Image (tube, rainbow, N blue to C red):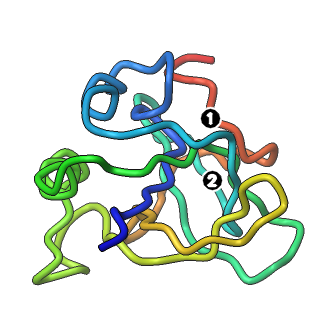
Amino acid sequence: MQKPLVFVYGSLRRGQRAHARLRAAARYLGPASVNGRLHDCGCYPAAVPSRRPGELIHGELYRLTRPDVLTALDRYEDCDPQAPHGGEYRREPAAVRLAGRRLSAWVYWHNGPLRGARRIRTGIWRGPGR
């Protein structure tokens, strides 16, 4: 069985504060992008899906190497797969682009309103305060 892919765009990326959660349990595949809009919530970003071709979120794609990692990521992202709209994020499959290929990967999308969050038009979150 193929191990799941996960697209990350914020604090789980290399060089960010929560990357250790992925480092020992996933294999980095490279820079990737997904259709969506990115918002800066201060200490972390929030993504919402978009169907517009020009609205892209840039991040990284990983192949998970341990089965328990997805459950740990769900807890970190305040995501409950049994009640997808009950937490701050929901995990859904999305078409992700990696080196010209389209792959299906899990993406954590933000639930609820983004009052006061600044839109990141470049689609790249640099980290808190950047």
Q: Which mark is residue 125?
A: 1
Q: Position of residue 103 (x, y in %)?
A: 62, 71
Quadrant occupied by the N terminus: bottom left
Secondary structure beneath disc 2? Answer: strand
Secondary structure beneath disc 1? Answer: loop
Residue farthest right in this picture? 54
Q: Position of residue 47 (x, y in %)?
A: 53, 59
Residue 79 vs 75, above or below: the answer is below
* In the foreground, 103 or 81: 103
Marks 2 and 1: in contact by CB < 8 Å?
yes
Residue farthest front in this picture? 1
Residue 55 vs 66, above or below: the answer is below
Tell whether 53 sits left or right of 47.
right
- Residue at (81%, 43%) from the top-left corner? 122
- Locate residue 3: give its quadrant: bottom left
Tell whether 55 sits left or right of 16.
right
Q: Amino acid at mark 2?
A: Leu
| Label 2 CA crowd tier, 10 Å (few <14, some 14–19, many 20+) | many
- Residue at (42%, 67%) from the top-left corner? 106
Q: Position of residue 40 (x, y in %)?
A: 55, 41
- Locate residue 120: give its quadrant: top right
Q: Earlier in the sequence, mark 1 or mark 2?
A: 2
Q: CA distance from mark 1 to mark 2?
A: 8 Å
Q: Which residue is mark 2?
A: 38
Q: Amino acid at mark 1?
A: Trp
| Label 1 CA crowd tier, 10 Å (few <14, some 14–19, many 20+) | many
* In the foreground, 78 or 22: 22
